[in-house]
Amino acid sequence: MTTTIGVFDSGFGGLTVLRALIERLPHANFAFLGDTARLPYGSKSRRTIARYAAESAQFLVREQGAEFLVIACNTASALALDAIQGAVSVPVLGVIEPGAAAARAATCTGDALVIATDATVQSHAYAAACHAEGLRSIEKACPLLVPLVEEGWISHPITAEVIRIYLAELTAEAAVAGLNPDVLVLGCTHYPLLRPLLEAAVPAGVRVIDSAQAAAEAAFHRINGHVAPQATDVPASPTSIRCFATDSVEKFERLGSRFLGHPVGQVQLVDLGG
């Protein structure tokens, strides 16, 4: 049988994770939920984030039949992964640990840079995940990048200059801390759209680590461990994608294609409560 994978984000930035999952698991079925009525999660308490995330996870499992969940939201991965795992009976994967693991696999120096939203940086979840991988790391919040991406300025000179300033500040902080970083972890699902600008701006020898790609790779290996492979004489079904949002369906349909790489199609409105 074809696997159904549920993907959850507080908005639609997590469509970059869905895009990577489709590339890695092209014959799975996908249900994506953006909790757009209750974003941003970063301004909420841990308890509220846990409740919102658990409700979203239950919708994907109970209503959409998801057999595996990918939490394509850095804030929820940082603050609510345990709550989500307790709310559903299927395997759950966040985006933070795979990103740290990918950084560990790519680094030679053992030192990493991390850029993310303010809420994710304040949680220090990437610092903890990097430490668990034996890495030293330094994090920086880059609050201007998300609105620039959503404005569509993904190749604009202003965006390039903002990135240059952020990375100059971050590398200076790393030098003061005595770090010699050779990897940069993208700790926000919006940032993969800026990868060309980021790769042009990082110091020589620094490799950009896309946590969306890392999560897709981790999901591929975990799903293969949880779901029996299809018989070779039975062709796999083509990818089916269902997208849901709790508000702003029109905006989701309009902007979502930037993140997914092709039109998201009709997005269904769902009500998960207050």
Image (tube, rainbow, N blue to C red):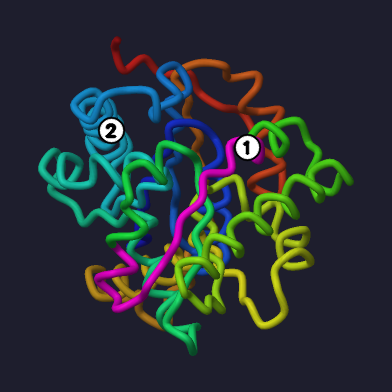
In this view of the protein, which residue sits in the foreground, 79 or 224?
A: 79
- The quarter holding residue 195 reads bottom right
Amino acid type assigned to the residue bearing label 1 in the image: Val
Total count of labels: 2
Q: Residue at x 43, y 38 (%)?
A: 9
Q: Is residue 240 visible?
A: no
Residue where numbered disc 2 is placed? 53
116 sits left or right of 151 in the view: left
Q: Residue at x 28, y 54 (%)?
A: 68
Tell me where residue 36 appears, x and y as whole percent. Answer: 48, 23
Q: In the orientation shown, which residue stands out farthest toward the front?
A: 176
Q: In the orientation shown, which residue stands out farthest toward the bottom?
A: 108
Amino acid type assigned to the residue bearing label 2 in the image: Ala
Tell me where residue 103 appears, x and y as whole percent. Answer: 45, 75
Q: Is residue 96 magenta?
A: no
Q: Return the disc, 2 or 1, that comes first in the chain's sequence.
A: 2
The C terminus lies in quadrant = top left
Q: Where does the magenta region start and end?
A: 129-145
171 sits left or right of 199 in the view: left
206 sits left or right of 136 in the view: right
Mark 2, Cα crowd under 10 Å, few <14 / some 14-19 / many 20+, is: many
Answer above or below: position of 65 versus 129. Answer: above
Q: Is residue 32 visible?
A: yes
Q: Residue at x 45, y 76 (%)?
A: 111
In this view of the protein, which residue sits in the foreground, 44 or 230?
A: 44
> Foreground mark, 2 or 1?
1
Tell me where residue 116 appears, x and y as whole percent. Answer: 50, 48
Residue where numbered disc 1 is placed? 146
